[in-house]
Structures are given as C-alpha cells and as structure tokens.
Amino acid sequence: MTTSSSMKIDLHNDYPGGRSKAWLAWSMPALFFLYEFMIRVSPGVIEGDLQAHFKVDTAEIGFTMSMYYYAYAPMQLVVGLLLDRLGGRWPMAIAALVCAMGCFMFAVAGGMTGLGTARFLMGFGSAFAYVGTVYVGSIWFPGRRIALLSGVTAALGMLGAVSAEALLGFLLEEVTWREAFNLFALIAVAIAVLMWMLIPRNPVWYTEQVRHARDTHGCGLLSGMACVLRNRQTWMLALVTALVYLPIGTFAALWGVRYLEVAMGFSTDASGPAVSMMFVGLGVVGPLIGWLSDRQHRRSTYLRIGTLVGLVCSAGLLVIPQDMPWLVYVLLLLLGGSAGTVVVAFPLAMEHNPHHSRGTAMTFVNFTQMILAGFGQWLIGGMLDSGASAGKSLETLDGTDFKKAFLILPAALLLSVLVAWFLRDPENRVEEQNAVVSTPLAD
C-alpha cells in the first residue's frame, strides 16, 4: 500500500520554534544516545573484574551481558508506537530513568541473575535513544536537515563507544566498578530531568494534522503499525538497511579480529585498530551522506551506492593477498562507510509513511536491522562450527574456513543491491510542504 502524495511527506520546511530551540530540543535526547552507547559497551571493560568477582566462566558472562539486546531489539516495535502516541518528552525521560534503575541494579547485584536483570533494564531504556533523538529532531528541524541529524546522531554513538573505554578506565583507577555504575545511574537521572524540562511540547497547530491522520488511517493503537506493514517501500527499505549494516553487526562487532588474525595474518595488536576503521568510516560518512541527501533531496540513491560499495569491499576482503595490509585498512574504512549510508533510511521511512506512523516506521527499520545482525552472527558462527565439526577445533580453523563463512557478506550485499534498485524517493519534495500541514504527531 502507498499513501496519497499529500500524505507521503510530512517533514516541514522551517524551524517551528527557531534554530536555538531546535538545537536545544535535539541535544537532550542526543546526549542520552551518547550515554546509552557508553553503558552498552561498558561490560567489555570490566568483564575480567566481573568474572573474577562472581567466579563464572566467559560463556556465562557473555550470555548475561547479552540480556541488553534481548530487551533492545523487540522494544523497537513498541518504541515507535509510544513515540507516535505520546511524543518525545515523556517516553524519553522515562526511558532514561529505566536506564538509571538498570545501572543501580548492576551496581548492587549479588549474582548473575541480578546482573542479567540490570542489563535487561538498560536495554529496555536504551531502545528509545536513537530513534527518539531522530524523532525529536524531525519535529523541530526542517525536513532538509533530518538525514544530517540522523548521521550526526550515529556519529555520537561511535564517540560514546570509543570514549567508554577511556572513561571507565579512568574511573576504575579511582573507584570500584560498583561505584562507577552508581555514578552512571545518577547521570541517567540528570539526563531524564533535562529531557523532561527541555524537550518542548509540540506547537498547538499540530492537532488538526493529527486528527486528520487518525481519521484517514484509523484511531486504533496499531493503526500506524498497520500502515507501515502494508507499505512495500518500507519492507524493502528495512531489508536493504539490515543487509548494508550486516558487516558492522557481524564483522566489526564480533568476528572481525579473529578473521584478520587467521585469514589475513594480522597480529593481535594490529587487528583491533584495523577493525575500528569500520567505525571511523561509519562515523565520518554518516553525517556527510546525511548532509548531501538533505541538500539534494535524494535518499534511495545513496543507499544504492552504499550497497555497491559494500559488495565490492566485502568481496575484496576475501580475495586480497596477505601482503597488502594497507589495502585491508582501506577496504574496512570503505566498508564501514558503506554502512554509514543507512542514516538516510530513517527519514526515508518517515517520508514513505503517513503522519501518524513516523516513529513506528523508523523503529520497524531499526528492528529489522538488529534482528538480521543477530541472525548473521549466529549464521557465521554456525558455518565456522561446521568447519570445526569436520575434524578441526575452533582454535585450528584456517583462513579458508573463515573465508568460506564470510561469503555470507558479499552474498547478502548482492541481494541488497538487487532490492535497492526498487527503492524510490517520494514524489513530492520536502520543500513543497509548509510547517502547518506537515507537523508530526507528538504530545
């Protein structure tokens, strides 16, 4: 199902409350997203301390810490519904308080059950951070700035991931890990208060658009989700986004260091920095592509470029010889950059769906992206296990085994190239809409 041209694009053309109010409104949830990424990756810094304190093996620690994702991924579908119903202020403030509760429970946990529950709460609250930040930005910024904001927000996440290790390392020189997480809890409470105070309510003239959208598409709680699920462009967009992001979720997040060591002959010290080039590429390309797509009013074109670059780079990593480490760095940088093009998917999802389902459309895309990343990790692990079952141990798998397993990446990106060909930008342009006609649903 597609919407009428008058309902396809609802991103306004000016700053409804002025530039300063727009930046202030966006900066509060953006700060929450920076914080959320820090607590997401923080267990990696204290894993050894946790293992020694609770006397458990690495497998149990890994499963307990993964409870974060078991909450984060399914909550994406709920987050969109809440944003479309309640707006940004209350859901985001409450989400930060849930993160605070999780950090406090982590600090006082007496066993693995307590740690798992704490991580689940952190994931539950963190599920609101990225899409909530983009959603608030879409209300107070012109439509021609939303992809740029999406990219800048993603770059903040990369900054949070990088700074978490340094910050926790500094803190753990002065305090225990329990005291550090008590501090994280207090920071989350402060962020919640700031978001409640500084994310403004929507302008009064939004009500007629909200009523019109509900009258047209239904007033039920799931009416927005129904519109999203009936839209073929949203399904294709979600699939392409998930496939383009797959190298980040599989190679960068889990298997990349082992691949470089075994298949490319990298040392342990060199493999980590090499994989981090993917995050550098994503952090740089995300804002740049967002800015370009906002200026040119083209979203799908950049996603197509991202699929092609990702296909070439992922295939290149499987065929280049070991004596060209500089080329590995270049390919990883470009592969991360290709994943950075996903920042245009969120505004494009909003533009393809009616007024009352913008948040739902964004979170549906994000949900698909995370689910496929998790499936990709499992699939590659299973393919490596199949090599081990052929008479090898996981420690003795060679470069050929890893390259066979990672054939999944160019195969997935080839599929994304084919699907991306059918992606379309909405017919109308953002600048053709005025602010009153285009106001999104909120408080």
Image (spheres, rainbow, N blue to C red):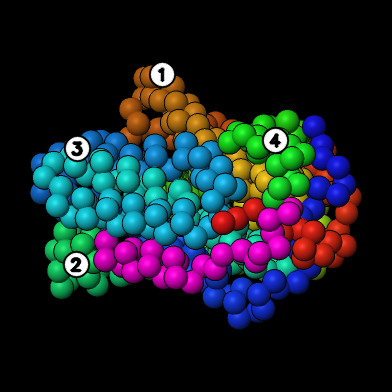
Does dot 1 land on a helix, a strand or a loop? loop
Question: In this view, which residue lies farthest toward the bottom?
Answer: 20
Q: CA distance from mark 3 to mark 2?
A: 23 Å
Task: From the viewer's perspective, tell me whether residue 267 is left or right of residue 340.
Answer: left
The amino acid type found where label 2 is placed reads Leu
Q: Which residue is mark 2?
A: 172
Q: Position of residue 421 (x, y in %)?
A: 82, 40
Q: Is residue 236 visible?
A: no
Q: Earlier in the sequence, mark 3 or mark 1?
A: 3
Q: Residue at x 56, y 65 (%)?
A: 201
Label 2 Cα neighbours within 10 Å, binned few <14 / some 14-19 / many ≥20:
some
Q: Earlier in the sequence, mark 2 or mark 1?
A: 2
Q: Earlier in the sequence, mark 2 or mark 4?
A: 2
Q: Is residue 412 above or below residue 336?
A: above
Q: Which residue is mark 4?
A: 218
Q: CA distance from mark 1 to mark 4?
A: 56 Å
Label 1 Cα neighbours within 10 Å, binned few <14 / some 14-19 / many ≥20:
few
The amino acid type found where label 4 is placed reads Gly
Q: Which residue is mark 1?
A: 390
Q: Residue at x 25, y 40 (%)?
A: 116
The amino acid type found where label 1 is placed reads Ala
Q: Which residue is mark 3?
A: 113
Does dot 2 land on a helix, a strand or a loop? helix
Q: Position of residue 214 (x, y in %)?
A: 70, 42
Q: Position of residue 330 (x, y in %)?
A: 61, 60
- Is residue 195 highlighted in magenta? yes
